[in-house]
Image (cartoon, rainbow, N blue to C red):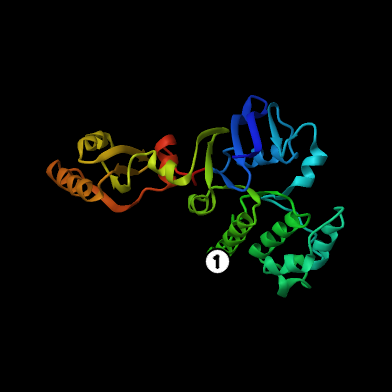
Amino acid sequence: MDSIIEVKNLQKKYGDFYAVNGISFEVVKGEVFGLLGPNGAGKSTTMEMLVGLRKPDGGTATIAGHSIGKDASKIKQEIGIQLQSTSLFELLKVKEIIELYASFYPSHIPIQPLIDEMLLTEKQNSLVKGLSGGQKQRLAIALALIHDPQIIFLDEPTTGLDPQARRTLWDIVLTLKERGKTVVLSTHYMDEAHVLADRIGIMDQGKLIALDTPNNLVSSIEAESAIEFKTKSPERVDEFNHLESVTNIVVNHDFVTLYTRNLQFSLIALLEYTKEKDISISDLSTRSATLEDVFLSMTGRGLREE
């Protein structure tokens, strides 16, 4: 498999604080590679270093064979970028701003088909300031695609969008993959990472703590299901280790999560044991194991916690 991005021991430091602390990974040509983690994990800083917006304090990275520190102009021809906080010209019309960006490059793809593909046809003569959040994100992606780059960086592209707008952007990302584009996507939504990414690097506190396919990551916690509940006796949680098929226990604030290979057996055993020992539990729920559980089991915190 051909690697189109290679990152080795990349670092970004502010005083004594490491925003990115020695991460290494490769991105294969034509895949969707996801950086998953909570806010402040270092995802955006990593992407900003790769696209040339921040200078690394250590490590190396190459994009399409070009070093990020030495070949910035060559890299710009290979990549398209949609940043988390893209600033657009609010008083230009949609088509005008796309035409403006197209003029920045020696060559570009046809503008009207791009507008149609981003579902902006009806808004092409509207001012940018009048667009919805989802429309602005699709416009930002259109601007990233105008010069037909082979690699597209999408930084938290669906943050703040309603469910329908999120799904629309998911379809766009999957279409880019079908065309052979390489997509590097950062997100703190585990469902988004699971649906879109071929492989996922999980980041936390500036470090890459896991890297694999979504299914392999979920399988790594050796549990098919999770049982969640509250208890007024958290000091007795360790007693649940002996319950049938339970593989791990995580306590997160008021909630206890039991991971199990057999939901039915573990649930029955939990209810019988808590009744026998007079342990009070509430807010009981069950679900399939997810990427959220991978992060929770590795850090003891949820993905969306600050």
For badge 1, the amino acid type reads Gln
Question: What is the quadrant of residue 274 in the picture?
Answer: top left
Q: Is residue 136 above or below residue 56?
A: below
Please say whether residue 59 is visible from this viewpoint.
yes
Residue displayed at 30% across by 53% down: 285
- 91, 260: nearer the viewer: 260
The location of residue 176, given as percent across then percent down, is 64, 56
Q: Residues within 10 Å of mark 1 (few under 14, many from 20)?
A: few
Element under label 1? helix
| Count of marks overlaid on the render | 1
Residue displayed at 45% across by 40% down: 295
- 197, 188: nearer the viewer: 197
The location of residue 63, given as percent across then percent down, is 71, 38
Left or right, 183 with respect to 283, comes to right
Q: Is residue 128 above or below residue 264?
A: below
The location of residue 138, given as percent across then percent down, is 68, 61
Q: Residue furthest front?
A: 1
Residue on which disc 1 sits: 164
